[in-house]
Structures are given as C-alpha cells and as structure tokens.
Image: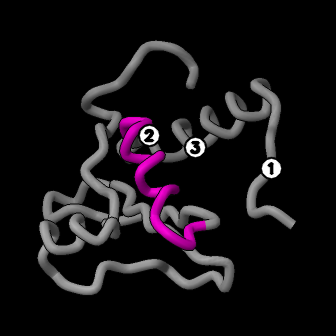
Amino acid sequence: MADGAKISKKKAIELVKKFKDNHPKSTHSVSYDATLIQELLAIPNCVTVRIHLAETDEKITTMVLVAVDKEGNAILPASEELTKDLANGTFILNDGRTCPPRCSSGEL
C-alpha cells in the first residue's frame, strides 16, 4: 500500500485553512523546484520521499526532504561534503521558499 492518498481540492483547502488559523505565525508552506524533486526521486533505489519538519537557526519552520528505499530507510549521502555526494547522485533537499514571507496568492 502506498504512503499517502489523493484528496479533493475542498479537503485540501479545509486542511490548510485549519492549520493557518491554528498557527498564524508559523510557516504555511515550503516550495521546491520540480527539477529538484525529480532529482531526489531519481536517486538509485528511491521509492518514496520522507519530509521532515525542521527549524532554522532563526526559528523558522522549514522542511528537509530525503529519498527513502523500499525498506523505509533514508538514502543518505556518504559524506558531509555536498559536492562529493552530488557526484554520486545522493543529496538531501532543503532551503525551499517559505511562506511567509514569500507567499503566493490563492487558497493553496
């Protein structure tokens, strides 16, 4: 069985609105380029993506995305040096556009 489920636009708007109403000062969303998501999914043995809630030094909520294999293990880079890991195709994704402050218009 897959992790996750497709939901209606109405349900999505309802869930997002509830979060925004209950957490008005929190990060409401984090956006990532589709090419980076596709590269993450293309990491060898990746079958899903795990999204971790995280916090910056400035106390801003953000997300950390990692590729995950069929056993549920994160596919992590072998070293602490990003350039070495990019050479073998592994990386961890962060640093998306947070809302606020950079928000789009609309309900989602």
- Of discs 3 and 2, which sits in the foreground? 2
Say if mark 3 contacts mark 1, CB within 8 Å.
no
Q: Does label 3 or label 1 sit earlier along the sequence?
A: 1
Say above or below: 27 vs 49: above
Q: In the visual, does 83 lie left or right of 73?
A: left
Q: Which residue is mark 3?
A: 19
| Cα distance in 3D space between marks 3 and 1 | 19 Å
Tag 2: amino acid: His
Residue 40 is covered by the magenta coloring: yes
**Residue 11 rendering spot, x and y as whole percentages:** 78, 33
Q: Which residues are magenta?
A: 32-46
- Residue at x 29% of width, y 71% of height: 88
- Residue at x 56% of width, y 84% of height: 73
- Of discs 2 and 1, which sits in the foreground? 1
Give the quadrant of residue 8: top right
Q: Which residue is mark 1?
A: 5
Q: In the visual, does 73 lie left or right of 27?
A: right
- Residue at x 37% of width, y 62% of height: 64
Say above or below: 46 vs 19: below
**Residue 14 rendering spot, x and y as whole percentages:** 72, 32
Tag of residue 100: none
Tag 3: amino acid: Phe
**Residue 67 rendering spot, x and y as whole percentages:** 49, 68
Q: Does label 2 or label 1 sit earlier along the sequence?
A: 1
Q: Which residue is mark 2?
A: 28
| Cα distance in 3D space between marks 3 and 2 | 8 Å
Q: In the visual, does 101 lie left or right of 9?
A: left
- Of discs 3 and 1, which sits in the foreground? 1
Say if mark 3 contacts mark 2, CB within 8 Å.
yes
